[in-house]
Amino acid sequence: MDSAIGIIGGSGLYEMEGLEEVRELDVPTPFGLPSDTLVEGRLGGRRLVFLPRHGRGHRFLPSEVPYRANIWALKSVGVEWIISISAVGSLEEDVRPGEICLPDQFIDRTWGRQGTFFGDGIVGHVAMADPVCADLRQALWDTRRAAGVPFHRGGTYVCIQGPQFSTRAESFWYRSMGARVIGMTNATEARLAREAELCYATVALVTDYDCWHETEEEVSVEAVLEVLRRNVDTARRIVREAAARVPRERTCPCKDAARFAVLTDPGRIPPETRRRMELLLGRYLEEDR
């Protein structure tokens, strides 16, 4: 099985001209079912695998998304790169609705989510100092001319629990932190992708100014959906261009991110936990004999 580029985003992203050999994949995982059926296809010789984050018909709250199952499922079908297409609010004046941000950092303000594959008898720690793959983000940055809208490079994505939008006080607080955009999903995905040794980067579609801006209307579902509808073609252009630019071989640190992560004596890992982690960390769990 050749390696693939995974696309997490809306359910209509795979409806693009030139996508061939399209098929659906039902992938059960040790962490339950993913958000929906995966859609696989080929574009310009690259294999792409699409997964609607919230399920077809938008059925999952940000805190209900089965993040572990989604990442495990993508890795199980050969995905090595994950491009996350996400709606965000802007926390900076010059990052305007309709534009694109490629953040390189996260602040995680969520709670109660299944944000790690570790546990149940296995302890591990991966480095998250640089949570976005630099090589993948560069490939996405190089799509900006084809995308046809302004791009902003770098910045911090603050990830809130949701499903409510932030209060005005919170919005000003996040701005004081130096965060550039605000969303509800990507920090959790980035953590799990790193544990799974997958490259991860966010394409943040700016839909609004959250509620801090004095002259713009505060964020609303109607406003977000209207901008997203306009941005669907932009997202497709980015995916199409990125498919030709993402390297075929990985030389980045992401591919070995969990090499020294596991602290538990392999002989003491429960058999069921070992089976669940085999796809992710099997090469590091060999017992000394």
Image: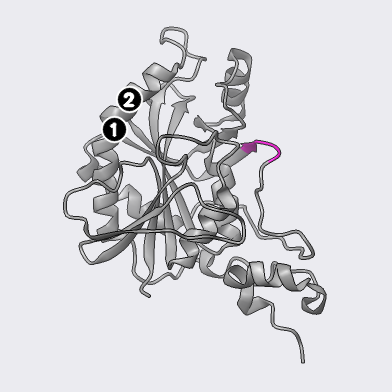
Direction bottom: furthest residue = 289
Element class at badge 2 = helix
Q: Is residue 97 visible?
A: no
Please report the bounds of the magenta region as a residue range.
108-112
Q: Magenta span has 150? A: no
User: Going 33% across and 31% down the picture, which residue do you hit?
Assistant: 99
Tell me if residue 15 comes above or below residue 195 in the rendering: above
Q: What is the three-letter code of the residue carrying label 1?
A: Asn
**x and y, in percent, of residue 171 in the image:** 57, 20
| Mark 1 nearby-residue class (10 Å; few <14, some 14–19, many ≥20) | many
Q: Is residue 145 left or right of residue 25?
A: left
Q: Are marks 1 and 2 in contact (CB under 8 Å)?
A: yes
Front one among 219 and 128: 219
Please identify the quarter of the rendering in which residue 106 is found: top right
Tell me if residue 186 comes above or below residue 1 in the rendering: above
Q: Main secondary structure of the magenta part?
A: loop
Q: Quadrant of the C terminus?
A: bottom right
Q: Magenta span has 111? A: yes
Q: Is residue 77 left or right of residue 164?
A: left
Q: Is residue 234 left or right of residue 213?
A: left
Element class at badge 1 = helix
User: Going 69% across and 67% down the picture, which residue do you hit?
Assistant: 261
Q: Kindly report the distance in space between the C-alpha atoms of the residues bearing marks 1 and 2.
A: 6 Å
Give residue 231's mark: 1
Q: What is the three-letter code of the residue carrying label 2?
A: Val
- For label 2, the residue is 227
Please identify the quarter of the rendering in which residue 284 is found: bottom right
User: Going 60% across and 36% down the picture, which residue do you hit?
Assistant: 63
Tell me if residue 81 comes above or below residue 91 in the rendering: below
Q: Quadrant of the N terminus?
A: bottom left
| Mark 2 nearby-residue class (10 Å; few <14, some 14–19, many ≥20) | some
Q: Is residue 45 visible?
A: yes
